[in-house]
Structures are given as C-alpha cells and as structure tokens.
Image (cartoon, rainbow, N blue to C red):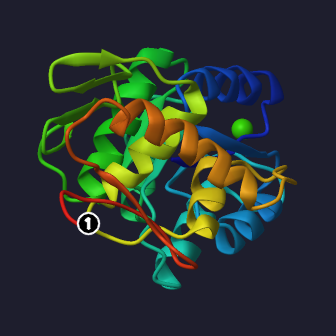
Amino acid sequence: MRILIIEDERRLAHVVKKGLIEDGFAVDLAYDGEDGMFMAETEPYDLIILDIMLPKLDGVAICRRLRQKKHNIPVIMLTAKSNVEDKVTGLDSGADDYLTKPFSFLELKSRIHALIRRSRGESSPVLKIADLTVDPIKHTVNRNKHHIKLTPKEFAILEFLMRHKDEVVSRTMLIEHVWDYNFEGLSNVVDVFVAALRKKIDGKATFKLIHTLHGVGYKISKSV
Ligand code: CA
C-alpha cells in the first residue's frame, strides 16, 4: 500500500517515512501544501498523512479540496495542538482520523492499518483466502499452517493482491501501489517479484492461488 506524507517538519516526515517503509509501505513525501495537493491528485495513494500547518496551502484546505473533487482517499490529520477546535475543523473538512503531535509511531501505524481496512470494507485485520493467511500488522504469512518468509516487497505485493482478491490486478496497479514515486524500473520487474512470490506461496501447495492473466495482470483466487 502506498502512502503520501504531507508535512513540512522534514525530520518528522523522514522518521515516519523510514518507519513505514520498514513496515512494507511505499511512501512519498511532500513538504508544502501545493506539492502535496498536486501529488495527491496525480498519484493513486492508498492513504494520506496530512499536517494542518503547512506552507502555501494548509491541511484543512487540502482536505476540503480533495473531498470537493470527490477523492475519497483515507486521510489522517496531524494536529500540533490538542485543541478541540483544530480536531473539529480537521474532521469537518473531511479527514477520517487525527493524531495530536507528538504521537507514538505505533499508534500512527495501528490507525493507518485500521483506516485502510475500513476504506476497503474489510472486517477482519487478517486477510484470508483458502488456506492462505496474511497478517498486515504482524507481517506474517501462513499457508496450510506453514509459516512463509517473504521479503518486504514480496509481502507488499501479496498484501495488495489479497486486498483485491478475485479481482484482476494489472502490473501498472502494482507499480503504483507497491513502489514509490522514484520507481524507474521496467514493468518486467513486477513479473520477477511475482514469480518469486508465487514460488513461495504456491510452490509446495496442492493448488495454485496466484494466477497470471496473460497481457492483463494477476489475480489471487481459489479458481482462475
Ligand atoms: Ca507543520
């Protein structure tokens, strides 16, 4: 899943970015409101972490504009003060959740997971299909009760496929949601990662879950 952080406190932005990358997210940064607004409108993010006090365009204005343009992407707002008014303004502008600075990274992470889950209409925090279980919070994968070890990128691809199970996922979708803005590879990079992932998920299993739809993309499903 891919996250945009719009935050002018660069140190904080970098710390959060580093933590989220370690957690398997693809992350882009914007340091002012105008850049942030532009990126939010042009790239398909799965969630935005939005500071309120920003140069050029503030977080409340960004959120209002996104909602006016019918962008329903989940937004977590960061407020500098624990001021009730700030929270209310933030939520009224269309934010889904807020955190007061300073916040704990663990809390941010758990709210991100909850919000992504809610936005996808998923009731359980654990993703399941047939005998495969993927836990995005604990970062664990099990198939037929065997633990499977994945690299962060393989995990991110699997998580995205699981959140779109029984749907066709194109290479472009994977590039846009699993890699960040600086991705410069060729789309066959995706094929290489999926091949490695498939070997680990389906290699020893009695039936395949990851299917290739030639010229279209991939699908995780009990049947093709
Ligand atoms: Ca700020």
Relative placement, left or right, of 61 versus 185 is left
Quadrant of the snapshot with the C terminus: bottom left
Relative placement, left or right, of 139 versus 131 is right
Please identify the residue farthest to the bottom as the structure is shown: 69
Which quadrant would residue 5 be assigned to in this image?
Answer: top right
Query: Residue visible at 43% across and 30% down?
Result: 200
Instruction: Evaluate whether residue 179 shows in this view.
Output: yes
Q: Amino acid at mark 1?
A: Asp
Query: Residue visible at 33% across and 61% down?
Result: 164
Image x and y of residue 187, in percent: 74, 62
Image quarter for ligand 1: top right
Query: Residue visible at 78% across and 30% down?
Result: 9
Q: Name the residue nearer the viewer: 22 or 53.
A: 22
Query: Residue visible at 49% across and 38% down?
Result: 197
> How many numbered circles are shown?
1
Image x and y of residue 64, in percent: 52, 71
* Category of crowding for the residue at label 1, using alpha-carbon neighbours closer than 10 angstroms: few (below 14), some (14–19), many (at least 20): some
Tag 1 secondary structure: loop
Image: 186 above or below 27: below
Relative placement, left or right, of 130 versus 47 is left
Q: Which residue is mark 1?
A: 166
Image: 141 above or below 41: above
Q: Name the residue nearer the viewer: 85 or 68.
A: 68
Image: 91 above or below 143: below
Q: Name the residue nearer the viewer: 212 or 35.
A: 212
Which quadrant would residue 73 be assigned to in this image?
Answer: bottom left
